[in-house]
Amino acid sequence: MQELLRKGLIRQASPEKGDIENLIKIAEQDILVAEKLLDTSYDASFTHSYNAILQVSRAYMFANGYRPREESHTVVIQFLSAVFGEEYSEMIALFDRMRRQRNKVTYEMTNIITKYQAEYALGKAKEFKKQMKDRIDAKLNKR
């Protein structure tokens, strides 16, 4: 964490409950959209699942009193890695792979996500959102 602060990638900030709740709502909405898009576009469904993970991760970051200096997805991943280490290492590695795939889908190619990948991403987004929301709720209720 200290290295991210020292490098200026993140900054300390007071947790704003409204901002945190909005990010969680965005994540929940993205999960709903990802479910609906499974029959239409695996790429789009995958992208929404990725965004749900990103937004709930940002909510967790905010709840812990930090914000990224820039809207960099990689900084959020680095933050999660610094906070959780081995506990969530598989999920964080998956999140980073999803980030790279999402970049390809968004900026380079189309129709590269399989049905399995879209469904797997959606399942992981639901699982991770619940885990992070539980942690956020516990954190905010301590205050």
Image: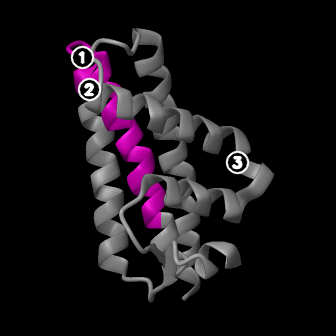
The residue lying toward the viewer, choosing from 138 and 74, is 74
Confirm whether the magenta stretch covers residue 75. no
Mark 1, secondary structure of its residue: loop
For badge 1, the amino acid type reads Ser
Disc 1 to disc 3, C-alpha distance: 29 Å
Extent of the magenta region: 35-59
Specify whether 102 is left or right of 132: left
* For the residues bearing labels 1 and 2, Cβ distance under 8 angstroms: yes
Quick one: label 1 or label 3, which is nearer the N terminus? 1
Residue 63 lies, with reference to residue 106, above or below; the image says below
Label 3: how many residues lie within 10 Å, few (<14), some (14-19) or many (20+)? some
* Residue 90 coordinates in the image, percent (x, y): 70, 38
Residue pictured at 45% horizontal, 46% vertical:
53
Disc 3 to disc 2, C-alpha distance: 25 Å
Residue pictured at 34% horizontal, 50% vertical:
27
For badge 2, the amino acid type reads Ala
Looking at the figure, which quarter contains the N terminus? bottom right
* Residue 103 coordinates in the image, percent (x, y): 37, 34
Label 2: how many residues lie within 10 Å, few (<14), some (14-19) or many (20+)? many
Residue pictured at 69% horizontal, 79% vertical:
2
Residue 102 lies, with reference to residue 130, above or below; the image says above
Disc 1 to disc 2, C-alpha distance: 5 Å
The residue beneath circle 2 is: 44
Q: Quadrant of residue 135?
A: bottom right
The residue beneath circle 1 is: 41
Confirm whether the magenta stretch covers residue 56. yes
The residue beneath circle 3 is: 88
